[in-house]
Amino acid sequence: MSVQSVERALKILTLFSHRQPVLGISDLSRMMDLPKGTVHGLTRTLVEHGFLKQDEQTRKYRLGLKIHELGIILSGTLELNQKAAGSCHQLSKRTGQLSRIGIWDGGSVVITLNTHPQPMPVLPHQVGPRIHAYCSAIGKAILAFLNEQRLNRYLEKTTLTAFTPSTITSKKRLIKDLEATRARGYSMDYEEAVQGLGCIGAPIFDRQGVVTGAISLSGPVNQIPGHEPETLAGEILSTAFEISHFLGYLPNIMESGT
C-alpha cells in the first residue's frame, strides 16, 4: 500500500532537472496540482533531511546534497560499474574517446559511468543523464538485443521525436536499424541525438545471458564512426565481451548446456 505523502515528496524531487534546477512553491504547486500549503509542508520536510536546499534570498528550492551523496554511493556500488570501470578506462585510453556505460531502466538508458582518455579539468557527471534509447548508440545496442515482447512494448509506448535532422523517427526504419545492429553486433549513431556527435555501442549481458546495459564510444562524427568504423567496432566489441564475462556471461558454456 502506498503512502500518499511519500509519493508526493518523491514526485517533487523528480520535477527538478537540468532545464529546471530551481523551483519555487508556486511552481511546484502548479506542477503538482496541489495547494501551496501542502507543498510547503512537503518541501520543509525534504529540506530538513537534506534532499532539498532553499535559497535564503529567493526562497526557491534546488536539489540538496543528500541526493548527490546517494548518487555517488549508487554509482560506486553498482555491480556493472564495479566490473566495467577498468575496462572502460582502458578503452578510452586506447581510442582517445569518451567511453560510457549505460543501464536499461524503464524504457530509457541511464548513464552510470563516464571515462575520459585524459584527466578532466573539472569532474564530469558520474551519474546520469537519462537518455533516449532510440536515438543513441548505447540505447540501440540494448534495444537490438531485447526479446521481442520487451522491444514491442517499448515501440508501442515510445514517440520517436526528432532531435536533429538525422534522428530516426520511423518505427519501421528503427526496426531495420536494430536488425542491422543485431547482425553485426554493434550499434551506430550518426548525429541522431546531437549534431556533430557520433557514437558506436555494444551490448553487455549478465550471467543469464540477458542484455542489462551497454558500452559506447562518443566523439566528433569525423572520428566516430570515422572512415574505418571496423577498428573501433573491434575495440568496443572486445571490451563489451570482457565486461559481460566479468558479470558471469559465459556464452559457450550456456549454449552447450553445461
Image: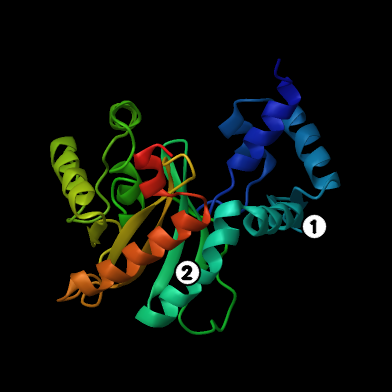
Viewer-side residue, 155 vs 217: 217
Answer with left or right where residue 180 lies relative to residue 202: left
Q: Is residue 33 above or below residue 54?
A: above
Q: Quadrant of residue 223?
A: bottom left
Q: Is residue 119 above or below residue 26?
A: below
Q: Residue flagged by tag 2: what amino acid is it?
A: Cys
Is there CB contact under 8 Å for labels 1 and 2? no
Q: Is residue 127 above or below residue 90?
A: above
* Residue situated furthest top in the rendering: 1
Depth check, mark 1 against mark 2: the one in front is 2
The residue labelled by disc 2 is: 88
Answer with left or right where residue 135 lies relative to residue 88: left
> Residues under labels 1 and 2: Cα distance?
42 Å
Q: Give me the residue at 40% from left, 36% from top.
A: 257
Which structural element holds mark 2?
Answer: helix
Q: Position of residue 142 (x, y in %)?
A: 35, 46
Q: Give me the residue at 69% from left, 57% from top.
A: 68
Answer with left or right where residue 77 lies relative to residue 106: right
Viewer-side residue, 16 vs 194: 194
Q: Quadrant of residue 238?
A: bottom left
The residue labelled by disc 1 is: 56
Q: Residue flagged by tag 1: what amino acid is it?
A: Glu
Q: Quadrant of the N terminus?
A: top right
Q: Position of residue 201 (x, y in %)?
A: 32, 59
Q: Quadrant of the C terminus?
A: top left
Q: Earlier in the sequence, mark 1 or mark 2?
A: 1
Residue 33 at least partly seen: yes
Viewer-side residue, 76 vs 7: 76
Q: Give me the residue at 26% from left, 57% from top.
A: 186
